[in-house]
Protein backbone atom coordinates (compact mmCIF):
# COMPACT_ATOMS: atom_id res chain seq x y z
CA UNK A 1 0.00 0.00 0.00
CA UNK A 2 2.82 2.37 0.78
CA UNK A 3 4.24 2.00 -2.71
CA UNK A 4 0.75 2.64 -3.99
CA UNK A 5 0.44 5.83 -2.06
CA UNK A 6 2.52 8.26 -4.07
CA UNK A 7 0.80 7.15 -7.21
CA UNK A 8 -2.57 7.72 -5.55
CA UNK A 9 -1.60 11.09 -4.22
CA UNK A 10 -0.37 12.33 -7.53
CA UNK A 11 -3.50 11.16 -9.29
CA UNK A 12 -5.79 12.54 -6.65
CA UNK A 13 -4.08 15.90 -6.62
CA UNK A 14 -5.23 18.32 -4.00
CA UNK A 15 -7.38 17.92 -0.94
CA UNK A 16 -8.53 20.64 1.35
CA UNK A 17 -6.72 19.60 4.49
CA UNK A 18 -3.44 19.56 2.62
CA UNK A 19 -3.51 23.13 1.49
CA UNK A 20 -2.51 26.42 2.96
CA UNK A 21 -2.99 30.09 2.41
CA UNK A 22 -0.24 31.63 0.33
CA UNK A 23 1.01 33.72 3.25
CA UNK A 24 1.72 30.62 5.29
CA UNK A 25 4.09 29.09 2.84
CA UNK A 26 5.54 32.21 1.30
CA UNK A 27 8.51 32.34 3.65
CA UNK A 28 9.55 28.75 3.21
CA UNK A 29 10.68 26.24 0.67
CA UNK A 30 7.98 24.95 -1.63
CA UNK A 31 7.68 21.91 -3.80
CA UNK A 32 6.23 22.64 -7.25
CA UNK A 33 2.88 21.31 -6.03
CA UNK A 34 2.94 23.57 -2.97
CA UNK A 35 3.85 26.58 -5.09
CA UNK A 36 1.04 25.77 -7.50
CA UNK A 37 -1.44 25.39 -4.64
CA UNK A 38 -0.33 28.69 -3.14
CA UNK A 39 -0.97 30.45 -6.43
CA UNK A 40 -4.52 29.16 -6.91
CA UNK A 41 -7.86 29.83 -5.30
CA UNK A 42 -7.55 26.91 -2.93
CA UNK A 43 -11.12 25.76 -2.54
CA UNK A 44 -11.82 26.19 -6.25
CA UNK A 45 -8.76 24.11 -6.96
CA UNK A 46 -9.89 21.34 -4.64
CA UNK A 47 -13.39 21.31 -6.03
CA UNK A 48 -12.10 21.16 -9.59
CA UNK A 49 -9.84 18.27 -8.67
CA UNK A 50 -12.51 16.32 -6.79
CA UNK A 51 -15.01 16.88 -9.61
CA UNK A 52 -12.86 14.97 -12.08
CA UNK A 53 -10.85 12.56 -9.90
CA UNK A 54 -11.82 8.90 -10.22
CA UNK A 55 -12.97 7.16 -7.06
CA UNK A 56 -10.72 4.16 -6.46
CA UNK A 57 -12.29 1.30 -4.50
CA UNK A 58 -10.09 -0.75 -2.12
CA UNK A 59 -11.82 -3.79 -0.64
CA UNK A 60 -10.80 -4.71 2.90
CA UNK A 61 -12.04 -7.59 5.06
CA UNK A 62 -15.62 -8.12 6.23
CA UNK A 63 -17.51 -6.20 3.52
CA UNK A 64 -15.59 -3.02 4.28
CA UNK A 65 -14.19 -0.95 1.43
CA UNK A 66 -12.28 2.32 1.22
CA UNK A 67 -13.23 4.83 -1.48
CA UNK A 68 -10.34 7.09 -2.36
CA UNK A 69 -10.42 10.23 -4.48
CA UNK A 70 -12.85 12.73 -2.93
CA UNK A 71 -10.93 14.58 -0.23
CA UNK A 72 -10.45 12.35 2.83
CA UNK A 73 -10.58 8.56 2.72
CA UNK A 74 -14.17 7.28 2.83
CA UNK A 75 -15.00 3.84 4.27
CA UNK A 76 -18.15 1.81 3.60
CA UNK A 77 -19.47 -1.18 5.56
CA UNK A 78 -22.11 -3.00 3.48
CA UNK A 79 -24.70 -5.58 4.55
CA UNK A 80 -28.33 -6.38 5.31
CA UNK A 81 -28.78 -3.22 7.36
CA UNK A 82 -27.69 -1.14 4.37
CA UNK A 83 -24.52 0.75 3.68
CA UNK A 84 -22.76 2.51 6.54
CA UNK A 85 -20.54 5.27 5.18
CA UNK A 86 -17.69 6.78 7.20
CA UNK A 87 -17.10 10.28 5.82
CA UNK A 88 -18.76 11.81 2.81
CA UNK A 89 -16.05 13.31 0.62
CA UNK A 90 -16.74 16.47 -1.36
CA UNK A 91 -20.13 17.08 -2.99
CA UNK A 92 -18.73 17.76 -6.47
CA UNK A 93 -17.62 14.10 -6.59
CA UNK A 94 -21.26 12.99 -6.54
CA UNK A 95 -21.34 11.22 -9.95
CA UNK A 96 -18.14 9.29 -9.27
CA UNK A 97 -19.03 8.60 -5.64
CA UNK A 98 -22.53 7.40 -6.55
CA UNK A 99 -21.06 5.01 -9.12
CA UNK A 100 -18.55 3.68 -6.58
CA UNK A 101 -21.30 3.13 -4.00
CA UNK A 102 -23.43 1.30 -6.57
CA UNK A 103 -20.48 -0.93 -7.40
CA UNK A 104 -20.38 -2.10 -3.78
CA UNK A 105 -23.90 -3.53 -4.00
CA UNK A 106 -27.59 -2.62 -4.18
CA UNK A 107 -28.11 -1.85 -0.47
CA UNK A 108 -29.36 1.66 0.33
CA UNK A 109 -27.27 4.11 2.32
CA UNK A 110 -28.76 3.93 5.81
CA UNK A 111 -26.03 5.51 7.98
CA UNK A 112 -23.45 8.24 7.40
CA UNK A 113 -20.80 8.99 10.03
CA UNK A 114 -18.72 12.20 9.90
CA UNK A 115 -15.26 11.86 11.52
CA UNK A 116 -15.08 15.68 11.86
CA UNK A 117 -16.54 18.79 10.30
CA UNK A 118 -13.97 19.57 7.59
CA UNK A 119 -15.17 20.19 4.05
CA UNK A 120 -13.23 17.32 2.52
CA UNK A 121 -14.94 14.87 4.92
CA UNK A 122 -18.46 16.29 5.39
CA UNK A 123 -19.28 18.42 2.34
CA UNK A 124 -20.72 15.35 0.59
CA UNK A 125 -23.49 15.34 3.24
CA UNK A 126 -25.07 17.92 0.92
CA UNK A 127 -26.18 15.26 -1.56
CA UNK A 128 -25.94 12.08 0.50
CA UNK A 129 -28.65 13.25 2.91
CA UNK A 130 -31.12 13.01 0.02
CA UNK A 131 -30.62 9.22 0.16
CA UNK A 132 -32.09 9.30 3.65
CA UNK A 133 -29.32 8.05 5.92
CA UNK A 134 -29.15 8.68 9.64
CA UNK A 135 -26.20 11.07 9.97
CA UNK A 136 -24.02 10.64 13.08
CA UNK A 137 -21.17 12.77 14.40
CA UNK A 138 -19.71 14.59 17.36
CA UNK A 139 -21.79 17.47 18.68
CA UNK A 140 -19.08 19.95 17.59
CA UNK A 141 -19.28 18.61 14.04
CA UNK A 142 -22.94 19.54 13.96
CA UNK A 143 -22.19 22.90 15.55
CA UNK A 144 -19.52 23.78 12.96
CA UNK A 145 -21.51 22.53 9.98
CA UNK A 146 -24.58 24.48 11.10
CA UNK A 147 -22.91 27.89 10.99
CA UNK A 148 -20.45 29.79 8.81
CA UNK A 149 -16.90 28.67 9.63
CA UNK A 150 -13.71 30.55 8.92
CA UNK A 151 -10.46 28.58 8.70
CA UNK A 152 -7.65 31.10 8.92
CA UNK A 153 -4.92 28.85 7.58
CA UNK A 154 -7.00 28.19 4.46
CA UNK A 155 -8.13 31.83 4.26
CA UNK A 156 -11.64 30.59 3.58
CA UNK A 157 -15.18 30.93 4.93
CA UNK A 158 -17.34 27.81 4.69
CA UNK A 159 -21.10 28.25 4.33
CA UNK A 160 -23.37 26.22 6.62
CA UNK A 161 -24.88 22.97 5.32
CA UNK A 162 -28.65 22.64 4.86
CA UNK A 163 -30.40 21.61 8.07
CA UNK A 164 -31.22 18.10 6.85
CA UNK A 165 -27.57 17.50 5.88
CA UNK A 166 -26.36 18.04 9.46
CA UNK A 167 -25.73 15.11 11.80
CA UNK A 168 -29.09 14.42 13.43
CA UNK A 169 -27.55 12.02 15.94
CA UNK A 170 -24.78 13.63 17.96
CA UNK A 171 -22.86 12.73 21.10
CA UNK A 172 -20.26 14.19 23.45
CA UNK A 173 -17.96 11.29 24.40
CA UNK A 174 -18.86 7.98 22.78
CA UNK A 175 -21.63 6.32 20.82
CA UNK A 176 -22.23 2.69 19.84
CA UNK A 177 -24.24 1.00 17.09
CA UNK A 178 -24.52 -2.56 15.83
CA UNK A 179 -25.14 -2.76 12.09
CA UNK A 180 -24.56 -5.59 9.64
CA UNK A 181 -23.66 -7.80 12.63
CA UNK A 182 -20.76 -5.47 13.32
CA UNK A 183 -20.40 -3.41 16.51
CA UNK A 184 -19.39 0.15 15.61
CA UNK A 185 -17.84 2.25 18.38
CA UNK A 186 -17.50 6.00 17.92
CA UNK A 187 -15.14 7.70 20.37
CA UNK A 188 -14.37 11.41 20.79
CA UNK A 189 -10.66 12.17 20.91
CA UNK A 190 -11.03 15.48 22.69
CA UNK A 191 -9.54 18.48 20.87
CA UNK A 192 -7.03 17.08 18.35
CA UNK A 193 -6.92 18.02 14.63
CA UNK A 194 -10.10 20.06 15.31
CA UNK A 195 -12.44 19.99 18.31
CA UNK A 196 -14.77 17.54 16.57
CA UNK A 197 -12.66 14.45 15.77
CA UNK A 198 -13.90 10.92 16.44
CA UNK A 199 -12.50 7.46 15.81
CA UNK A 200 -14.73 4.82 14.23
CA UNK A 201 -13.79 1.37 15.51
CA UNK A 202 -15.10 -1.83 13.98
CA UNK A 203 -13.66 -3.97 16.78
CA UNK A 204 -14.71 -7.42 15.55
CA UNK A 205 -13.17 -6.71 12.15
CA UNK A 206 -10.17 -4.98 13.78
CA UNK A 207 -10.54 -1.94 11.52
CA UNK A 208 -10.24 1.69 12.68
CA UNK A 209 -10.99 4.88 10.75
CA UNK A 210 -9.00 7.62 12.47
CA UNK A 211 -10.27 10.61 10.50
CA UNK A 212 -7.61 13.32 10.31
CA UNK A 213 -5.91 12.36 13.57
CA UNK A 214 -3.61 10.25 11.36
CA UNK A 215 -2.05 11.19 8.03
CA UNK A 216 -0.12 8.30 6.58
CA UNK A 217 3.37 9.40 5.53
CA UNK A 218 2.60 13.11 5.09
CA UNK A 219 2.66 16.13 7.40
CA UNK A 220 -0.85 16.80 8.74
CA UNK A 221 -2.90 19.96 8.69
CA UNK A 222 -3.85 21.17 12.18
CA UNK A 223 -6.91 23.43 12.40
CA UNK A 224 -6.36 25.95 15.19
CA UNK A 225 -9.43 27.92 14.03
CA UNK A 226 -11.73 25.19 15.37
CA UNK A 227 -9.83 23.84 18.37
CA UNK A 228 -6.99 21.76 16.94
CA UNK A 229 -3.40 21.87 18.23
CA UNK A 230 -0.13 19.98 17.92
CA UNK A 231 -0.53 18.67 21.47
CA UNK A 232 -4.06 17.50 20.72
CA UNK A 233 -2.84 15.84 17.54
CA UNK A 234 -0.18 13.98 19.59
CA UNK A 235 -2.72 12.93 22.26
CA UNK A 236 -4.95 11.53 19.52
CA UNK A 237 -2.02 9.63 18.00
CA UNK A 238 -1.37 8.09 21.44
CA UNK A 239 -5.05 7.13 21.72
CA UNK A 240 -4.87 5.50 18.29
CA UNK A 241 -1.78 3.52 19.30
CA UNK A 242 -3.67 2.17 22.34
CA UNK A 243 -6.57 1.15 20.11
CA UNK A 244 -4.51 -0.66 17.48
CA UNK A 245 -2.48 -3.86 17.40
CA UNK A 246 -0.06 -5.02 14.72
CA UNK A 247 -3.01 -6.71 12.98
CA UNK A 248 -5.35 -3.70 12.94
CA UNK A 249 -6.26 -2.23 9.56
CA UNK A 250 -6.03 1.54 9.99
CA UNK A 251 -7.80 3.88 7.57
CA UNK A 252 -6.11 7.29 7.86
CA UNK A 253 -7.82 10.56 6.95
CA UNK A 254 -5.23 11.22 4.24
CA UNK A 255 -2.23 9.52 2.70
CA UNK A 256 -2.60 5.92 1.63
CA UNK A 257 -6.11 4.47 2.00
CA UNK A 258 -4.92 1.69 4.31
CA UNK A 259 -2.18 1.76 6.92
CA UNK A 260 -0.92 -0.05 10.02
CA UNK A 261 0.37 0.42 13.55
CA UNK A 262 4.01 0.71 12.48
CA UNK A 263 3.23 3.72 10.28
CA UNK A 264 1.00 5.17 12.99
CA UNK A 265 3.88 4.92 15.47
CA UNK A 266 6.19 6.62 12.97
CA UNK A 267 3.63 9.42 12.61
CA UNK A 268 3.37 9.87 16.37
CA UNK A 269 7.15 9.88 16.83
CA UNK A 270 7.53 12.44 14.03
CA UNK A 271 4.98 14.75 15.68
CA UNK A 272 6.70 14.48 19.07
CA UNK A 273 10.21 15.08 17.69
CA UNK A 274 9.23 18.12 15.63
CA UNK A 275 7.20 19.54 18.49
CA UNK A 276 10.28 19.36 20.72
CA UNK A 277 12.55 20.91 18.08
CA UNK A 278 10.17 23.82 17.49
CA UNK A 279 9.42 24.35 21.21
CA UNK A 280 13.14 24.49 22.02
CA UNK A 281 13.73 27.19 19.40
CA UNK A 282 10.67 29.14 20.49
CA UNK A 283 11.82 29.04 24.14
CA UNK A 284 15.09 30.59 22.95
CA UNK A 285 13.06 33.56 21.75
CA UNK A 286 13.44 32.92 18.04
CA UNK A 287 10.82 34.34 15.68
CA UNK A 288 8.74 32.14 13.41
CA UNK A 289 10.84 33.20 10.42
CA UNK A 290 14.05 32.28 12.24
CA UNK A 291 12.61 28.94 13.31
CA UNK A 292 11.48 28.09 9.78
CA UNK A 293 14.96 29.03 8.53
CA UNK A 294 16.52 26.71 11.14
CA UNK A 295 14.63 23.78 9.52
CA UNK A 296 13.48 21.96 12.66
CA UNK A 297 11.75 19.36 10.48
CA UNK A 298 14.82 18.59 8.35
CA UNK A 299 15.36 14.94 9.38
CA UNK A 300 11.73 14.17 8.46
CA UNK A 301 11.23 16.17 5.27
CA UNK A 302 12.33 13.55 2.77
CA UNK A 303 9.56 11.22 3.92
CA UNK A 304 6.84 13.50 5.29
CA UNK A 305 7.27 16.76 3.41
CA UNK A 306 6.43 15.61 -0.08
CA UNK A 307 2.74 16.47 -0.11
CA UNK A 308 1.04 19.84 0.02
CA UNK A 309 1.76 20.58 3.70
CA UNK A 310 5.44 21.33 3.31
CA UNK A 311 8.12 21.79 5.97
CA UNK A 312 7.58 25.55 6.34
CA UNK A 313 3.83 25.36 6.83
CA UNK A 314 4.09 22.40 9.17
CA UNK A 315 6.69 24.26 11.25
CA UNK A 316 4.27 27.18 11.44
CA UNK A 317 1.41 24.91 12.53
CA UNK A 318 3.54 23.42 15.31
CA UNK A 319 4.86 26.86 16.34
CA UNK A 320 1.30 28.11 16.86
CA UNK A 321 0.74 25.49 19.56
CA UNK A 322 3.95 25.44 21.63
ZN1 LIG B 1 -9.50 17.62 8.46
Image (cartoon, helix red, strand yellow):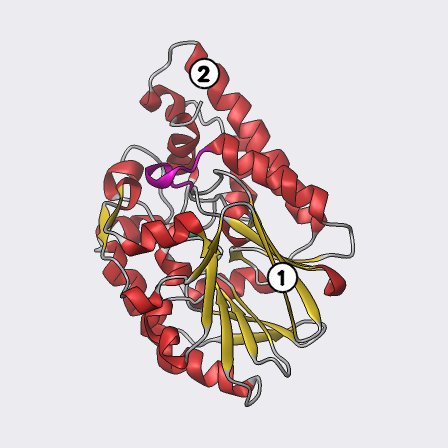
Residue 87 position in % (x across, y down): 47, 64
Quadrant in which the N terminus appears: bottom right
Query: Which residue is labeled 1 in the image?
Result: 258
- Residue in the foreground of this view, choosing between 168 and 68: 168
**Viewer can see residue 308:** no
The residue positioned 69% from the left and 43% from the top of the image is 241
Residue located 72% across and 59% down the image = 203
The secondary structure making up most of the magenta span is loop
How many residues crowd mark 1 within 10 Å: few (<14), some (14–19), many (20+)?
Answer: many
In the image as oriented, which residue stretches furthest toward the bottom?
106
Magenta-span inclusion, residue 273:
no
Is residue 229 something that shows in the picture?
Answer: yes
Callout 2: few (<14), some (14-19), or many (20+) C-alpha neighbours within 10 Å?
A: some
Residue stretch rendered in magenta on the structure:
222-229
Estimate the spatial distance between the alpha carbons at disc 2 and disc 1, rounded to whole Å: 35 Å
The percent position of residue 309, horizontal first and vertical second, equals: 41, 45
Q: Secondary structure at mark 2?
A: helix
Residue 281 is marked as 2
Q: Quadrant of the C terminus?
A: top left
Q: Are marks 2 and 1 in contact (CB under 8 Å)?
A: no
Amino acid sequence: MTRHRNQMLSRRGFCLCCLSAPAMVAGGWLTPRQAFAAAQGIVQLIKADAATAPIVVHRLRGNVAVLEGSGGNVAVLSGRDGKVMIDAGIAVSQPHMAAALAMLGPEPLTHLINTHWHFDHANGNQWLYLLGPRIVGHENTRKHLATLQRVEDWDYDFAPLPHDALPGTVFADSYGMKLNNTPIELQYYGPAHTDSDISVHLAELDIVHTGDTFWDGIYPFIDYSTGGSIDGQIRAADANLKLCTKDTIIIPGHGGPVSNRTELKNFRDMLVAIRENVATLKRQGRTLGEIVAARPTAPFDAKWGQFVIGPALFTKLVYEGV
